[in-house]
Image (cartoon, rainbow, N blue to C red):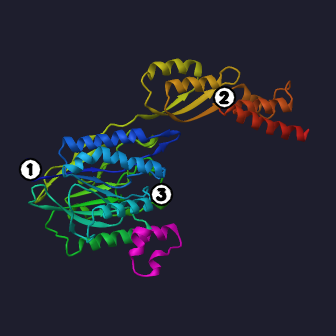
Amino acid sequence: MPTTIADMKVLHTADWHLNDRLGRIDRTDDLRTAVEKVAAHCREQAVDVLLVAGDLFSELARPDALRETIHHWQDVFTGFLRGGGTILAITGNHDNENFCKTLQHAMTLAAPTTGEPGQVVQPGRLYLAAEPTFLKLRSKADDFAVQFVLMPFPTPSRYLKQAAGEAAVKYATAAEKNRKLTNAFERVHGELRKHPAFDPAMPAILGAHITMHGSTVGPSLFRLQESENIVVSGEAWHEQYAYVALGHIHKPQFVMHPYVRYSGTIERLDLGESNNQPGVVLVEFNAEGRATEPAILPVGGTPIYEVTLLNPKDDLPRLKEEYPDADEDLVNLHIHYTAGEDNLEAILHELGRIFPRWYARDWTETGRLRESLSLGEADRGKSFRKTVIDYVTQELLQHDPAQQAELLAVVEGLIDGEE
């Protein structure tokens, strides 16, 4: 269907995890660059609504970093908001509840709303749904409205405290907690749809930060134990909504229907996401509902991979040739070396030159030192004291010299005390 001026364009994204870290690497700049690409899509596609389906912030973010991130948002999205664009954001399981509630209250003070379900809200603002929310937005031509049901990740404070009775917030096991939260999520969602202001004939969009049954998680959930995850069926969502904008699972995908979709992240966040293609999803709506099929717009993504050295003398020259432009890559290094033949400190230094953004590394001594410490194969020419000191010295190569000296002094004192 051709686009008309009356259409409402919605850009669906999720799982920004701003101010995150990967090992020793601060991801702030990578993630800010990705946010700027999202803003560019908003500008180039003349987007009306940016819908962020949860996990805006990393749980690793410090208060000062969160403040700087809000300033960055202002710089990046001021033009979008002044042009009448609207940002709808949902809190996820990694978002700090206290911070998000405080931010929500501050925004409400700046531009008060009634907070009543089904309220038609003004465009040109950021609305943060820190609790289940139902609101409406008018098209730019003011000839139709779209309903948005926004469902944050289910936590006891967000969902169980709304239930009647003290028993609702008590649970003895993780399984009981998950069962109560699943039931509460589905109950609250049903109540919002039954609200008198909800019009089944009007286009509706569901935004939720949740695991939907039938989705593909990938290698693992991002910093979440399986026992902590909440899974809902969502089996009727494709009939109830013109589009379902999901967050929480980082692998981009649709679930059973092309318009029930996880957008995925805007950056690769760990090794398990190395094959993911970060992006956002653009969908247009008119008075009848969905006017276009979902279109995926790329955002890019930093390469993340592993490198293993089995023979440093041969592998280091090869790596220099194979990775001449790896300055921005995120790399997990695995090093095998032989004591007495390979200089571990020099190897680590050279790898740091090739891969300056290595985020984790480990090494294994595979040669004579390990053999000399094996039971029944000790070097008869070495004293017990010399053997232990040599071994500890080799293992402490990666430490600061002052730490090396301090730890060696402790080891020597223990040995001398036994002799």
Residue 242, x across and y down, in percent: 19, 59
Residue 24, x across and y down, in percent: 53, 39
- Residue ID for mark 1: 5
Foreground label between 2 and 1:
1
Marks 3 and 2 sit apart, C-alpha to C-alpha, by 36 Å
Mark 2 Cα-neighbour bin, 10 Å: few <14, some 14–19, many ≥20: some
- Residue ID for mark 2: 366
Q: Secondary structure at mark 3?
A: helix
Q: Which residues are magenta?
A: 156-181
Mark 1 Cα-neighbour bin, 10 Å: few <14, some 14–19, many ≥20: few
The residue positioned 54% from the left and 20% from the top of the image is 316
Q: Main secondary structure of the magenta part?
A: helix
The amino acid at mark 3 is: Glu
Q: Secondary structure at mark 1?
A: loop
The amino acid at mark 1 is: Ile
Q: Is residue 295 visible?
A: yes
Q: Residue furthest front?
A: 110
Q: As displayed, is residue 154 above or below residue 323?
A: below
